[in-house]
Amino acid sequence: MKSRLLLFLLFITGNILSGYLFAQPTGWQDKVKWFFAVEKINESEAYIVANAKLIDGWHVFSVNHDPAKADFTGYPTTFKFQPNKNYRLIGKLTDGKKPMTHNDDLGTSLYFEKIGVFKQKIEVLSGNKFDVEFDYSFQICDELGCLFPPDQEGKVSVSGFIPKNKDIVDEVQENTGVSGDTNKGAVVDNIHENRGQVKQVDSPRADGQESKEVRSLWSVFIEGFVWGFIALFTPCVFPMIPMTVSFFTSSTKSRKKGIFDALFYGFSIVAIYVSVGLLITLLTNNAAAIYEISTSATLNLIFFAIFMLFAFSFLGAFEIRMPSKWVNSADKKADKGGLVGIFFMAFTLVLVSFSCTGPIIGTSLVNALTSGSVIAPAVIMFGFSLALALPFMLFAFFPGMVSSLPQSGGWLNSVKVVLGLLEIALAMKFLSMVDLAYHWNILTREIFVAIWFVIFAVIGFYLLGKIRFSHDSQVEKLSVTRFMFAFTSLVFSVYLLTGMWGAPLFMIDGVAPPRTHSEDNFRWAKGPSVNEIAMEIASIDKEQHDLFKEYKKYMHEVGDGSILVFHDMDIAQEYAKKMNKPLLVDFTGHSCANCRKTESKVWTNDKIRPILKDELVIVSLYCDDRTPLPDSEVRFSEILQGKIKNVGNKWSEYQIKRYNQISQPLYVIQDLEGNDLTEAIGYTPNIDEYRKFLEKGLSKFNKQQSSNE
């Protein structure tokens, strides 16, 4: 009897412990800890600093992360500050350090590992102590999936500041006795760890951060160098090389002096262009300004217009020139001689060649501004000017090489025309970014690819001499070099043509709109889906045919458009019962990269697609859906440690309660009563493993149905 009682007590205790240890969700709280502080700038301004400390393998997204550039994956960190008469916000929330960058087939992501730092500048309007309260939202991910915590609440206390307004200062001193010198230089170390006190904020760089930044700036420099090299072969620059080199080597008494003058001439070119880059850097001296430039619809439309303007200039419609007064003034100063004269000779070259180099400079600067780096404009101008200046310096050392240069002629205008056509292609990128971000659906993938196909076909035929623009001379003989450029362009245009039928076109990934941004998911080329065909077959059960038509309005296309899913759990369960099919529950997210990979690569595989379309009903529950819930459904969740405010919070809580997991994607198959037929599985890119998971659920469902008959 005692032994049975002991076993019973052990059984109960074991169940209680296992329920406590294993039923607790693997939530977001053990992946990231938030720390908040006030960092004093001066007597009346401060930063509200938020540090997200992450465990290894997890990352949080930058405030500058743009889901539109990552196939709409990744949720940027946001803070919403509560209005308070004691302070006002200055500018927008910014990253406290440079984020890491990751590029893959989904696009570009900006994020932090180990430590994420975010700053909001404020002006203090009161000398009294007060609290700054805010809500913040974020997403954290690892290589297997992402977590979507509900919106969190935080606050920090601010004290020891003196407002700029003297009347307020006097009132503060009278009421509180705080003197103007009190607490000068003090930093409020009021730091809260999820509403708990800690004593310091540490903001170390994530490992590998420096190397990523250096590589990024190197790529910007190389891009500038390539643009500069291209500018050399324009009609405004190329003829100047032998003329200028001859001047320095023949007008001086010693070769040494000629070489020195030529070197100073090249240095002056670099200094002039880098100065332009530095000026733009000063005008956009923070990451927030760069982010606004790279994501603003207005500015991207302006960039589109500028590129089209450059294109028309290169094609011969008009010339973009510097004011003649500037050119004449610089030319007069160049006649003075000495180093000053040489500098103004370089300045004259910059002004005179602007009709050719201006569009190229504009293109490179726009690319630099949208790269995300504050100093990119100066770096790209350094690369551009170095490539432009090197020939003048190189030929001064080896003047005999000048004779080996090809003769000026009609081929220089051909370079301008090709650049003009390329400018039109690049302009489409900026228009596409706006179209994607604002869901205009004007520049679809078909139209974008069609424009690029025509552009590169025109380049090919133009280089073959079949098309002529103004200022072009007759192509009497076709050089091997010209033929190879034409051949390459035509081959690339044929490659692009395949994209009109839904080909992936990996060579222009990140430039062209994604395949899902097409007019009908290329159904006109692929034909109707298996579901649609099945429902039209006369032998199909009329009841199922009518059900499909009735519920079609609740279904949404995913992947390549051939797979239909529900977003409402109740409607999906209702439909599954009527169709007598098991339900595949898909916990997903709009900004979940692995979810999109599963939909586009696993679900569309020929071993998986027929099962999903013909034998299962699918419901996709978006755990980051920001659609607000009715006030009657808003409540505090103990599991999420936050308020259930929107649809995504609701599905996140359901996922944790039911499956003890919060990361997406997560898949499970349920029967008609909502009971699980399989264990829940996460991201599974292996096709055979995912098929076994589906077949296991179907097998159990069929056995269940057989036993019920």
Image (tube, helix red, strand yellow):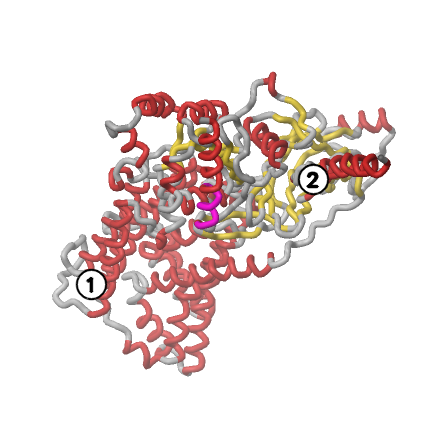
Q: Can you give x and y, in whole percent of width and height, for residue 686 in the image?
A: 47, 51
Residue type marked 2: Phe
| Residue 302 shows up from this direction | no
| Residue 142 shows up from this direction | yes
Residue at 34% from the left image edge and 49% from the top image edge: 504
Residue at 54% from the left image edge and 51% from the top image edge: 374
Query: How would you rate the neighbour count of disc 2 (Cα within 10 Å): few for under 14, some for 14-19, many for 20 or more?
Result: few
The numbered mark at residue 22 is: 2
Q: Which residue is mark 1?
A: 410
Q: Which region shows up in magenta?
A: 688-694
Q: Do residues under tags 2 and 1 come within 8 Å of each other at their CB atoms?
A: no
Secondary structure beneath dot 1 equals: helix
Q: Can you give x and y, in whole percent of width and height, for residue 507 in the image?
A: 35, 55
Residue at 69% from the left image edge and 25% from the top image edge: 84
Query: Quadrant of residue 4 in the image?
Result: top right
Q: Main secondary structure of the magenta part?
A: helix
Residue at 81% from the left image edge and 27% from the top image edge: 172
Question: Quadrant location of the N terminus?
Answer: top right
Which mark is in front, 2 or 1? 2
Q: Can you give x and y, in whole percent of width and height, for residue 298 in the image?
A: 42, 36
